[in-house]
Amino acid sequence: MDNSQYPVARKSGLVVQEMPDEVLVYDLNTNKAHCLNQTASEVWRACDGKTSIAEIAAHFGKGSNEDLVWLAIDQLSENHLLENQVAPRFKGQSRREVIKKIGLASIVAVPVIASLVAPANALAASSCACVAPIGCVTGPNMGPTAGSSICPSTMCNSFGTCAP
């Protein structure tokens, strides 16, 4: 059995939030957040290792184009959302060429994965209340008063944010 014809969606190391028309996936290994539109999320959910690309394409209705599913698989693989990397089907082709191949009628269903890199914990600063010249106040008497901080064992920088 050709593994690329029976892709498997990655489950480990991901935080998944289902939304009505999309799926938000946060990759704990790369600190990347991915937003899968409806088409991409349906393809990702169907990647169970038992369902072929042709069967996934049939899910989208009569006359659906396998190339539409392959475009989603390419994007899922590129974003490391599949267990095994799949060789890109449209390597070297522009997005315009791929859309022509898929067909203009399918343009509404084109799978889209939007990704962004989230800052690592050490780089993400949370805000805290600072009182110049004292700085952040931490300790057992912390509270919602000016000069208190919810950031124990950190220091407040001159911009009012906690830093390691």
Image (spheres, helix red, strand yellow):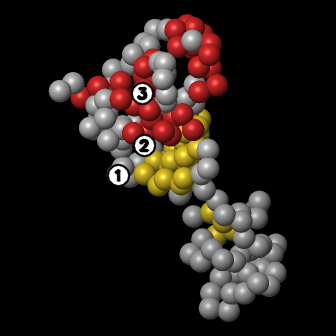
Q: Position of residue 122 (x, y in %)?
A: 53, 57
Q: Looking at the image, is mark 3 or mark 2 earlier in the sequence?
A: 2
Image quadrant for the C terminus? bottom right
With 36 as the anchor, is 29 left or right in this view?
left
Q: Position of residue 134 (x, y in %)?
A: 76, 77
Whether 66 is drawn above or below 100: the answer is below
Which residue matches tag 2?
Answer: 45
Which residue matches tag 1?
Answer: 12
Which residue matches tag 3?
Answer: 58
Residue sitting nearer the eye, 6 or 65: 65
Q: Looking at the image, is mark 2 or mark 1 earlier in the sequence?
A: 1
**Residue at point 58%, 37% (across, down):** 37
Marks 2 and 1, Cα distance to the nearest angstrom? 14 Å
Residue sitting nearer the eye, 118 or 163: 118
Marks 3 and 1, Cα distance to the nearest angstrom? 28 Å
Q: Looking at the image, is mark 3 or mark 1 earlier in the sequence?
A: 1
Tag 2's secondary structure? Answer: helix
Whether 66 is drawn above or below 93: the answer is below
Q: Is residue 91 visible?
A: yes
Question: Tags 3 and 2 in contact by the CB under 8 Å rule?
Answer: no
Q: Amino acid at mark 2?
A: Arg
